[in-house]
Image (spheres, rainbow, N blue to C red):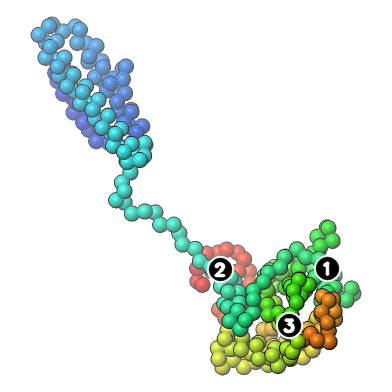
């Protein structure tokens, strides 16, 4: 029987070395001291021994039993003082580093452009993406029969609203709420039902600009936008103004920058049409201003040599991580 005891003790020693959780600690206890535990079985046989043997074997069994009990108790104490009832917590291990994110290229571009205008005194404002026909068209001097009002060119809701097709809506909202002087830019999403391809998306980003007071002229427009484009594309950037038409500015221009041997359209702009001032309740005889709008994706694509607009929206980390 003494051999059996020392075999069990040896076995228990090896098993104890593998105990690393509260569950294993409990299984270990039951395996030796439970109702059918290995040590319990031996204790049951004690009665069959002759008295002299009983004393020696009993003492031996008790020694092993106490050792197992105190080992189990010690493990319990250690793991609860480590603040964790099921595992031993090693506070010297390094922590788990959370993965670090970064700002999306479109947002970076918006921040950079906004920063340039903010430094020229323009305040950043935002407007809603679900809009009324009044803010998106009527107040912007866009006639009822204008093609952009067609259901093929604007997303309408079933409740008589629409997804704004341009950030010019924010011009109207700000002017309705405030009096001149105003210098604002308004970045945000716009929506148009275009078929998605490498250069079109049903949703993209614009930045709108508006400056209004009693003396702003077309040369202010020219000075502000030329400075902006030189800040963004470099101090030697050449620009070109082309006559254009927008219902809400008069005169209107498209502004190109020189790009390699050719020119690339970057901005739409113009002096605010008096009809727009009239719609928001300003005195047209004393109010002057200019407005402009630009496409964020287009600028980001040009500057980074991105050839497919869909990259911006697909959340492919291989693309996003490059910026
Ligand atoms: N809203 C015009 C567009 O989406 C851009 C623009 C804004 C033009 C302001 C002139 C003045 O094309």
Q: CA distance from mark 1 to mark 3?
A: 23 Å
Work out whether residue 85 or residue 35 is closer to the camera in this orientation and state it.
Answer: 85
Does the beta carbon at disc 3 come under 8 Å from ligand 1? no
Quick one: SS at disc 1?
A: helix
Which residue is tagged 2?
104
- The residue lying at 35 percent from left, 40 percent from top is 83
Pointer 1 and pointer 3: residues touching (CB < 8 Å)? no
- Image side of residue 256 versus residue 19, left or right: right
- The residue lying at 32 percent from left, 16 percent from top is 35
Look at discs 2 and 3 and give the one toward the viewer.
Answer: 3
Quick one: SS at disc 3?
A: strand
Q: Residues within 10 Å of mark 3 (few under 14, many from 20)?
A: many
In the rendered image, the vertical position of residue 226 relative to residue 192, given as above or below: below
Work out whether residue 254 or residue 284 is closer to the camera in this orientation and state it.
Answer: 284
- The residue lying at 69 percent from left, 90 percent from top is 220
Looking at the image, tell me whether mark 1 or mark 3 is earlier in sequence order. 1
Residue 240's quadrant in the figure? bottom right
Does the beta carbon at disc 2 come under 8 Å from ligand 1? no
- Image side of residue 319 versus residue 167, left or right: left
Looking at the image, tell me whether mark 2 or mark 3 is earlier in sequence order. 2
Q: Residue 75 placed where, x, y %? A: 28, 34
- The residue lying at 13 percent from left, 6 percent from top is 50
Residue farthest right in this picture? 145
In the rendered image, the vertical position of residue 296 relative to residue 162, given as above or below: below
Pointer 2 and pointer 3: residues touching (CB < 8 Å)? no
Q: CA distance from mark 2 to mark 3?
A: 32 Å
In the rendered image, the vertical position of residue 282 relative to residue 193, given as above or below: below
Which residue is tagged 1?
133
The image quadrant where one finds the N terminus is top left
Q: Residue 114 placed where, x, y %? A: 61, 77
Which residue is tagged 3?
212
């Amino acid at each position: 029987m003494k051999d059996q005891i020392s075999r069990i003790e040896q076995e228990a020693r090896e098993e104890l070395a593998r105990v690393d959780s509260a569950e294993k600690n409990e299984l270990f206890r039951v395996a030796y001291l439970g109702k059918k535990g290995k040590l319990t079985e031996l204790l049951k046989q004690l009665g069959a021994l002759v008295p002299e043997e009983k004393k020696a074997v009993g003492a031996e069994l008790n020694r092993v039993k106490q050792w197992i009990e105190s080992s189990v108790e010690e493990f319990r104490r250690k793991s609860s003082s480590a603040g964790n009832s099921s595992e031993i917590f090693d506070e010297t291990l390094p922590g788990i580093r959370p993965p670090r994110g970064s700002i999306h290229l479109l947002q970076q571009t918006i921040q950079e452009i906004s920063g340039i205008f903010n430094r020229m005194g323009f305040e950043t404002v935002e407007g809603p993406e679900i809009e009324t026909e009044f803010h998106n068209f009527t107040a912007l001097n866009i006639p009822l029969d204008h093609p952009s009002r067609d259901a093929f060119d604007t997303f309408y809701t079933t409740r008589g609203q629409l997804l704004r097709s341009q950030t010019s809506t924010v011009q109207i909202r700000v002017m309705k709420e405030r009096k001149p002087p105003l210098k604002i830019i308004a970045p945000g999403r716009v929506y148009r039902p275009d078929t998605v391809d490498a250069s079109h998306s049903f949703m993209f980003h614009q930045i709108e600009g508006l400056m209004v007071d009693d003396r702003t002229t077309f040369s202010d427009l020219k000075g502000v936008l030329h400075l902006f484009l030189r800040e963004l594309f470099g101090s030697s950037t050449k620009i070109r103004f082309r006559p254009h038409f927008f219902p809400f500015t008069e005169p209107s221009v498209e502004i190109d920058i020189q790009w390699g041997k050719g020119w690339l359209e970057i901005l739409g702009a113009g002096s605010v049409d008096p009809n727009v001032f009239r719609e928001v309740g300003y005195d047209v005889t004393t109010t002057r201003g200019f407005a402009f709008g630009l496409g964020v994706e287009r600028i980001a694509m040009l500057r980074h040599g991105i050839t497919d607009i869909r990259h911006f929206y697909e959340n492919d980390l291989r693309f996003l991580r490059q910026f």
